[in-house]
Amino acid sequence: MELQRVKIRSFRNIESEEVSFAPGVNLLYGKNAEGKTNLLEAVYYFSRGKSFRGATDRELCSFGKGGFEISAEFFGGGRKQSLLYRTEGREKVRLRNGAPVDRAADMLGHFRAVLFHPEHLSLVKGSPEGRREFLNVAIAGNDPSYISLYATYAKILEERNSLLKLAQKGGPFIEDEFYVWSERLAEAAARIVRHRYDYVARLAPAAAAILASLSEGREQLSLSYHSEAEDISVPLLSEFYANLFKSDVKRELAAGFTVHGPHHDDLSIRIGEHAAREFASQGQQRSITLSLKLGEGEVSREVTGEYPVFLFDDVMSELDPARRRFLLSSLAGRQILVTACDGRDFTPAAAHLIHTVGGHYEALAE
């Protein structure tokens, strides 16, 4: 997959810009707060359908503007494609290859990107929530239907928790309604867990091979999905969850929320015989995270038949020279958009240089 051109209007500090990209490494460089990350945010919007910084569409609009427009031209799936998003007040316009698209979900899965930014460096020692989010985003990048599945699970969970919270506060416990929501939650939970187990089974060997190469064989990485459903070969996994959701109702009534389910699961990361969360050094954490993100790209290629576009936001300064060299050599032949404050670590022969100043992007002559 190759991003060829984006056009942006009234997005963050970008007034009106058209930016072209080259195959291989594209370096966006300039001082802080000039718009490097804003451009990556716009590009990633085509992959995920929303900001990776948690901003709403309204917050993405330039100051004083009522909307924004972003469009992309890219080569993927063996052909040239295009996507366009335009917002103006409450009106939203979506075009895929020039044709109107009603549902946001139908815009996803056409342009694929892997994002690596400084917050990802906390994946190893951070909360299980961060690792679940990593899995959710990675899975959805290859299978957009997972977004709808997880949204359904979250909605059912919210309804079930509302009933538990009502009873905890002294209200009536509506048992029949509660068990209807529990059955529906069990069905969605089973599907989510199967998706996650399958994804980790693909990711584990890819990430392990990358870390072995990065460490010259000194470190062995193992990944596993930690879930209450230890055996997903059970034909009716939904029955397992239905029974699980019935097993602790008294405890849940006291707590006021659902105490079981995939929203409590975790990605287990080990270096050799040791849990990386407890024993990994700072350098090992960076190497593991790098391996996970590069592995995400390998799984995307395995599933879709082509590599995604790699977006690296301000992570070069977080990596030592050896890891930077490994990153760039590992991504040879793939398209990368990387941001940095200083372009001196790159040369025109190694990268397409784009100087960024005040939301304006100027390609340097090669």
Image (cartoon, rainbow, N blue to C red):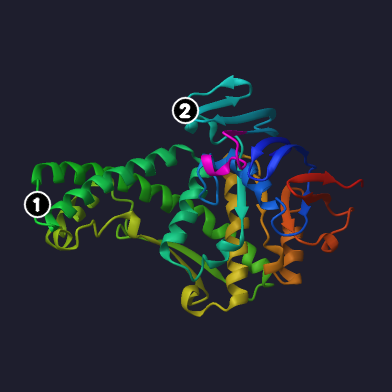
- Residue for badge 1: 171
Q: Is 156 placed above or below 84 here?
A: below
* Residue sitting at x 69%, y 28%: 79
In the image, residue 363 lies in the stretch drawn in magenta: no
- Amino acid found under the numbered disc labelled 1: Gly
Q: Which mark is residue 346?
A: none
- Residue for badge 2: 103
Q: Is 306 placed above or below 99 here?
A: below
* Residue sitting at x 70%, y 50%: 35
Instruction: Determine whether label 1 and label 2 are within 8 Å by CB.
Output: no
Q: Quadrant of residue 215?
A: bottom right
- Residue 96, image x, y percentages: 59, 26
User: What's the magenta region?
Assistant: 58-68
Q: Nearer the viewer, residue 65 or 232?
A: 65
Q: Quadrant of residue 113?
A: top right
SS label for mark 1: loop
Q: Is residue 113 left or right of residue 195?
A: right
For residue 50, say whether it is visible: no
Q: Is 333 placed above or below 78 here?
A: below
C-alpha span from label 1 to label 2: 39 Å
Q: Is residue 109 left or right of residue 365?
A: left
SS label for mark 2: loop
* Residue sitting at x 60%, y 36%: 65
- Amino acid found under the numbered disc labelled 2: Arg
Q: Is 31 placed above or below 8 here?
A: below
* Residue sitting at x 62%, y 69%: 287
Q: Nearer the viewer, residue 36 or 316?
A: 36
